[in-house]
Amino acid sequence: MDNCYNCGAGLTPSARFCAACGAPADSEQTRVSSEATRLASEETRVAAPRPRAVEPLPVRPLAQTPERRAVESGAEEQVVFTVRPTLLFVKLGYALAALGGLALIALLAWQPWVSIPFYVSLPLALALLLVPAYKHLKRNTVRYTLTDSKIEIDQGLVSRTTRNIPLRNIQDVTVSATVFQRLLRFGNLVIDNASETGGTTVLRNIPDPRRHADLLLRELRRWR
């Protein structure tokens, strides 16, 4: 069944005119008109833009300080280094005490005026080792620890004191060493801090102070 090319109404096969508008029922013209109408509707359907899905914009995280990162992650502090004062003086003290003890035993054994038995001279010689042993014990009561957020200074044996210096308060780091200290590869690390009380903290007689100063400065750059 064809349609009228003028109004689009349906036509019977034997109709010569359209019953709706009176236009001649020319089958060829009606077919062309119907085909043009179909092609126009398809072009309109193809040309209609499809709705595009709206993608959410990426959300950039806010800049976080090391303290905020440590709190949010719940991670423990990372220890960069732990150092004590050099053992050089303690070793030298033990060596001198041992030599002094041998000399004392020999002196007491060979002196002609009084005969002192060996079991008496030996404890006297061993008593000389008490001096370097005390220095050794005192040296072990001091410990310097650098973490990724602060410097800890522990001192004391029975009554122990711990001092914490946050890295954000440190203003300057200086390596101080005399000629004698430079020859023996130890020295002092001087730290200027900007706390409420202010002042200077000295890590005394630590081995290889320049390397420890570089490690401290590397951690300070992360806080700047």
Image (cartoon, rainbow, N blue to C red):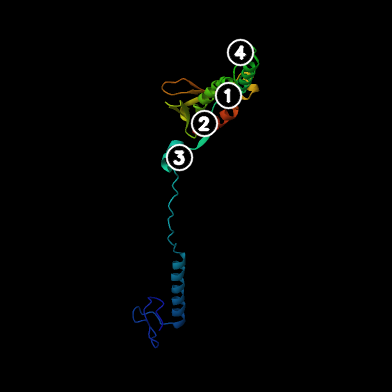
Q: Do the residues labelled 2 and 4 touch (CB within 8 Å)?
A: no
Disc 1: which residue: 90
Query: Does residue 224 appear in the picture of this structure?
Result: no
Q: Which residue lies furthest to the top in this view?
A: 113
Give the percent coordinates (x, y) of residue 195.
Answer: 43, 24
Q: Looking at the image, is mark 4 or mark 3 nearer the viewer?
A: 4
Q: Do the residues labelled 4 and 1 touch (CB within 8 Å)?
A: no
Q: Nearer the viewer, residue 62 or 153?
A: 153
Among numbered discs 3 and 1, the one appearing first in the sequence:
3
Disc 2: which residue: 220
Query: Does residue 144 appear in the picture of this structure?
Result: yes
Give the percent coordinates (x, y) of residue 96.
Answer: 62, 20
Q: Residues within 10 Å of mark 2 (few under 14, many from 20)?
A: many
Q: How far apart are marks 2 and 3 (CA)?
A: 18 Å
Q: Is disc 4 placed on a helix, strand or loop?
A: loop
Amino acid residing under circle 1: Val
Q: Is disc 3 placed on a helix, strand or loop?
A: loop
Disc 3: which residue: 76
Q: Are marks 3 and 1 in contact (CB under 8 Å)?
A: no
User: Which residue is rendered at x = 65% and y = 22% of the image?
Assistant: 183
Among numbered discs 2 and 3, the one appearing first in the sequence:
3
Amino acid residing under circle 3: Glu
User: Which residue is rendered at x = 44% and y = 67% of the image?
Assistant: 45
Q: How far apart are marks 2 and 1 (CA)?
A: 33 Å
